[in-house]
Amino acid sequence: MSAFELFCGDCLDPVTGLASLADKSVDVVIMDPPYEAEAHTSARRQTRGPDGIAEEYSIDFAEITEPQRRAAADETVRLTRGWVLCFCQIEAVGLWRTALEAAGAKWRRGGVWVKPDGAPQFTGDRPAQGFECLAMAWAGEGRSRWNGGGRRACYEYNVNNFGREGGAHSRQHPTQKPLALMQALVRDFSDPGALILDPFAGSGTTGAAALSLGRRFIGWEQNAEWHAGAVKRLANVREQPDLFGRTKQPKPKQSALAFGGEAK
Ligand SMILES: C[S@@+](CC[C@H](N)C(=O)[O-])C[C@H]1O[C@@H](n2cnc3c(N)ncnc32)[C@H](O)[C@@H]1O
């Protein structure tokens, strides 16, 4: 394959989806599937648009279902020689753990993406949500290994940090992850040359991070418009990986201490 391949369609289709790939044919899965029903039905979210002004938007793709969660876990564990990382809301960490373990992976850690600029709670009747979670499981042989030494699984990056890529504003998707966050995960959980899979690609941020850091990428996105935007974005990154690899994001605030070996 070339540096990237992004299919337009349902990744869970039994013929044309993940099922079409051979066992253990990718190195790492970093996926950002739809969240639970409550995240989707709360409907309106707020973010900063290209001009810095607050904009409202809705999530216009469906929440994940239990059969989809099980199928995604089964397929990604079957396919990877290493990590399966899965973004989710805190209420779903246990659900993803159960699904990944049932598929044969070893549970390793729950991680967090802390969002210092996350939206306030506009209703004022409860605290605002300040983070999202990551389920981290190992589907490879033997002991798990990563490039982060003894660091904590805590990634702190602003939500509203969309720069310009290829002359266009890089915000293309309602739940787009920051590029710098995805680059940190790619660095920590894969080596140069690795093949990274994201079956729920959206605007292609996982792929953009992978290509900008000398990895390869394979993915699926079911929405034709987002798929087309992501293909364009990835082609730009492939042509100019250094340009898109540089970001103004602060590094995660963690101790510089790195302890060898694996956290228990
Ligand atoms: C949370 S978003 C991913 C956003 C992405 N991380 C980004 O930075 O742009 C989830 C995406 O998965 C897509 N999706 C949902 N179910 C899918 C399926 N079965 N196959 C392929 N794509 C799917 C949705 O259309 C949506 O774009």
Image (cartoon, rainbow, N blue to C red):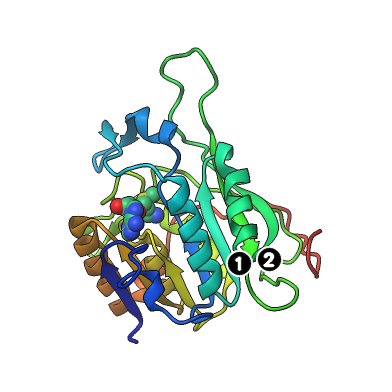
Q: Residue furthest top?
A: 125
Q: Amino acid at mark 2?
A: Gly
Q: How many numbered dots are placed on residues in this image?
A: 2
Q: Is residue 149 left or right of residue 191?
A: right
Q: Amino acid at mark 1?
A: Asp
Q: Is residue 89 left or right of residue 229?
A: right
Q: Quadrant of the N terminus?
A: bottom left
Q: Measuring from the top left, give residue 213's x and y in whole percent.
A: 46, 74
Q: Are marks 1 and 2 in contact (CB under 8 Å)?
A: yes
Q: Measuring from the top left, give residue 240's x and y in whole percent.
A: 31, 76
Please state the quadrant of the image where ligand 1 appears: bottom left
Query: Which residue is nearer to you in this view: 102 or 250?
Result: 102
Q: Quadrant of the C terminus?
A: bottom right
Say which residue label 2 marks.
148
Q: Residues within 10 Å of mark 1 (few under 14, many from 20)?
A: some
Q: Measuring from the top left, give residue 82's x and y in whole percent.
A: 60, 73
User: Which residue occupies 52% across, 30% down?
Assistant: 129
Mark 1 residue element: helix
Q: Measuring from the top left, give residue 62's x and y in whole percent.
A: 32, 43
Is residue 17 among what the camera can see?
A: yes
Mark 2 residue element: loop
